Amino acid sequence: MERQPIPFEAFNANVMHLFDRQWLLLTSGNYAGRQYNAMTISWGSLGFIWGRPFVQVLVRPHRYTFEFMERYPTFSVCAFPPEYRPALSLLGTRSGRAGDKISAAGLTPAPAACIEAPVYAEAELVLECRKMYWQDLDPAHFLLADIAKNYPIQDYHRLYFGEILAIEGTAKFREEV
């Protein structure tokens, strides 16, 4: 995939499409030590907070990736072209505890530019992030009654805010400034 560094001020993405329709791959761990895990995400946000560009991701405590998010200070969020939808589906439904699901999905982990967590050769967009905040969802704060239906076993997500340290992407994610 032909990716280039993208300055923050030139980054342009349809965030609703990325999360809701395209899906993203969250990966945390250490590439050099071959200790990492990935999971598909379709909930989250991108924005600007505390004077920093950030991505917000949500991980349930029972997910294997949760252990890596807790242990390591960095993570990557990657987007892929449409032909990788089956790979993202596999990565969202199979646990890394049971085997090498990344290889089974046909993805190629690669070193990131400035974080320990890996990125992927096939990705068309890479966000390299450093954790800067976390918060457990509290059901007492749900203001809409139907939100609770997302938690039939009360396994509430932990939210992580990651400062975006570097962006790489194809031309479609770069706006000329």
Image (cartoon, rainbow, N blue to C red):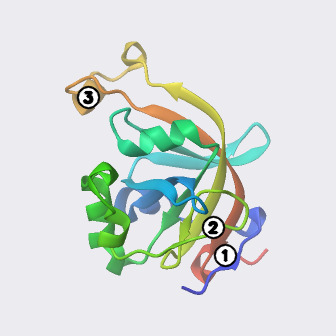
Q: Residue at x 74, y 78 (%)?
A: 176
On the image, the x and y values in percent for residue 174 come to 67, 75
Q: Quadrant of residue 101?
A: bottom left
User: Could you tell me which residue is drawn at 33 percent across and 34 percent down?
Assistant: 62
In this view of the protein, can residue 150 be seen by the observer? yes
Gap in angstroms between the C-alphas marked 2 and 3: 33 Å
Whole-percent x and y of residue 109?
Answer: 50, 71
Instruction: Work out whether mark 1 precedes mark 2 in sequence or the reverse, and give the earlier one.
Output: 2
Q: Secondary structure at mark 2?
A: loop
Tag 1, which secondary structure?
A: loop
Residue type highlighted by circle 3:
Tyr
Residue 102 lies in quadrant: bottom left
- Are the residues at dot 1 and dot 2 in contact (C-beta closer than 8 Å)? yes
Q: Is residue 16 visible?
A: no
Count residues near mark 2 (Cα–Cα under 10 Å), then give few for <14, some for 14-19, many for 20+: some
Q: Nearer the viewer, mark 1 or mark 3?
A: 3
The residue indicated by pointer 1 is 174
Closer to the chain start, of discs 1 and 3, is: 3
The answer to whether residue 105 is left or right of residue 175 is: left
Residue type (three-letter) at the residue carrying disc 1: Arg
Residue labelled with disc 2: 12
Q: Which mark is residue 151?
A: 3
